[in-house]
Amino acid sequence: GQNIDQPTEMTATEGAIVQINCTYQTSGFNGLFWYQQHAGEAPTFLSYNVLDGLEEKGRFSSFLSRSKGYSYLLLKELQMKDSASYLCAASSASKIIFGSGTRLSIRP
Amino acid sequence: DAGITQSPRYKITETGRQVTLMCHQTWSHSYMFWYRQDLGHGLRLIYYSAAADITDKGEVPDGYVVSRSKTENFPLTLESATRSQTSVYFCASSESLLAGTGELFFGEGSRLTVL
């Protein structure tokens, strides 16, 4: 079967850095997605890691270790608008399975 | 406009009725997905399709039926709605699951309430 785990909630301070971890177990693994979802809205794409290593996109970076079944999303210079849920999802065969999401709260 | 659209956006129905949620994408993406989202459960995969006339069950397929006679459409039908199917339903599409083109595009969601 497939299993994706990420923390349920995290809190961080404006201007700081936060790392959201995700572990996964799946057969036929293709890659690992990160999505951001604000309350009442559809998820929006942040990153898709297929190869091991770190990918940086502005304030957001995502890391993948295929051998460890581990990924993280790193958010730098946190802003209040980064308060949202962050969804980790594993792509395998022809399907994409999501974890339960991490609700990130930013305090001033 | 190009994109992925869902209809209806909001629907209230009664237990036992049949409901169909429509999903249409204009990119000719091969892959299409239906998810439901409930508090505490994140996004759960109902059905997915890798191409026209190819559909497969996801994590929670019971009570749902899909079809994909055309690449651009992927309707989801609740044959006999139950209260437990009250949820927000998201349709999504992707060109491929490979690097560089694997982004999953979501519709705006359909909020279904079953009374």
Image: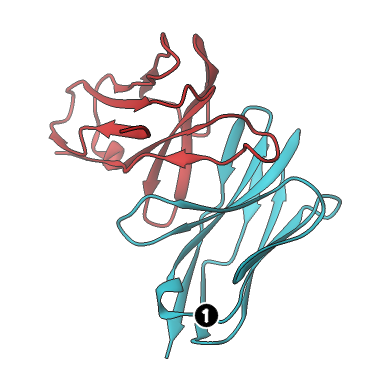
Chain colours: A cyan, B red
Which of A107 and A80 lies nearest the eye of the viewer?
Answer: A80
Hey, which residue is sitting farthest bottom in the picture?
Answer: A108
When the figure is inspected, residue A48 is found, relative to residue A78, above or below; the finding is above
Q: Residue at x 18, y 24 (%)?
A: B16
Crowdedness of circle 1 by 10 Å Cα count: few (<14), some, many (20+)?
many
How many numbered circles does the render carry?
1
Q: Residue at x 73, y 38 (%)?
A: A30
Image spot of residue B31 (x, y percent) = 53, 26
When the figure is inspected, residue A91 is found, relative to residue B29, above or below; the finding is below
Residue type (three-letter) at the residue carrying disc 1 = Leu
Image spot of residue A18 (x, y percent) = 61, 78
Quarter of the figure that contains the C terminus of chain A: bottom left
Q: Residue at x 45, y 15 (%)?
A: B71
Q: Report in which chain the residue with disc 1 lies.
A: A
Which of A66 and B41 lies nearest the eye of the viewer?
Answer: A66
Image spot of residue A71 (x, y percent) = 72, 59
Q: Which residue is mark 1?
A: A78
Q: Secondary structure at mark 1?
A: loop
When the figure is inspected, residue B56 is found, relative to residue B111, above or below; the finding is above
Which of B115 and B35 lies nearest the eye of the viewer?
Answer: B35
Hey, which residue is sitting farthest right in the picture?
Answer: A67
Left or right for B94, reference B110? right
Image spot of residue B57 (x, y percent) = 52, 23
Quarter of the figure that contains the N terminus of chain A: top right
Q: Residue at x 60, y 61 (%)?
A: A6
Left or right for A103, reference A60? left
Left or right for B15, reference B24? left
